[in-house]
Image: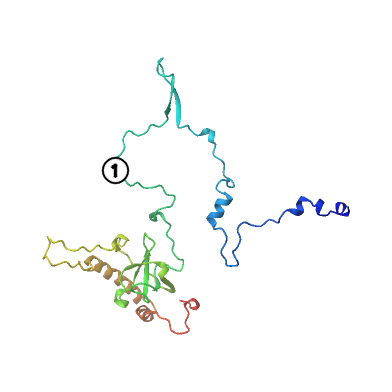
Amino acid sequence: MSGLFHGGPEMASETDTKKPHASRNYELGGSGVMRFSHSRMYKKRATYKKAKAGQKKADKSKTTPRMVKKDIGGEKNGGSRTIRVTRMPRFYPTEDRPRKLHSRKKPFSEHRRKLRPSITPGTILILVAGKHKGKRVVFLKQLGTGLLLVTGPYHLNGCPLRRVNQIYAIATKTKMDISGVTLPERLNDDYFKRQKLKKPKHTEGEIFDTKKEEYTVSDERKEDQIAVDKQVLDTIRSHPDKKLLFGYLGAMFSLSNSQYPHKMVF
């Protein structure tokens, strides 16, 4: 009988039998992989059903019904009919045409164009990828797509007017004042679009002439290159350290043993 008065197993309370709370999602054997994925837990918690903080629930009473009851005269017409508020279309297309789906994402043309604060007009950049990697170029302006317009100049290192992504460029502390350089208005993204080279048709030229057209630099691009480079070279010549700048832009960037880019100051 002593067990009845001293809280023995016969009189154990409900709180003692309850198990401690444990999460349904736990790590599997210390592997770093969870039992359920994020999407699985999202479904299990049903957070999409719960109202968010500061969000009001939509009033369902104000929603317009799809069907409406309409009174119809005449003894043999049944008195009333249920009709649609918005009628179905009378014309159906014979072919299924692709249509644009509504998306919440903004198109690329409406994206924000950001530029690193270290890159300003006149900054000398080091290219780390592409055909001209390792060359030092002069940054002129940012184009509509967010790409950078740079030039070698071509006379110094062979890099022409071209577009470069800023993630493939290292900004140096060496800067030039190019406020007096005027760029042609046609230097935009359409100017640098790649031309489609076509094969000649059988009706054009000889029968066995099936080679593609080779890309050749247009006279327009040559004129713009000469006009821009002339102004940039004049700016370098007016700089007090013009000899160092000429050598700096003409030299290739490279790393040797025990040189780490993350420890360098450019």
Task: Determine which quarter of the picture holds residue 158.
Answer: bottom left
Task: Give the image location of residue 191, x and y in percent.
Answer: 29, 62
Residue at image location 48% in from the left, 79% down from the top: 260
Task: Determine which quarter of the picture holds residue 254.
Answer: bottom left
Secondary structure of the residue carrying numbered label 1: loop
Task: Give the image location of residue 176, x and y in percent.
Answer: 39, 72
Task: Give the image location of residue 141, x and y in percent.
Answer: 37, 65
Judge left or right: residue 257 versus residue 59. Answer: left
Q: Which residue is mark 1?
A: 95
Residue at image location 19% in from the left, 63% down from the top: 199
Residue 220 in view here:
yes
198 above or below 158?
Answer: above
Residue at image location 76% in from the left, 54% down from the top: 16
Disc 1 residue type?
Answer: Glu
Judge left or right: residue 229 versus residue 264. Answer: left
Judge left or right: residue 23 versus residue 202. Answer: right
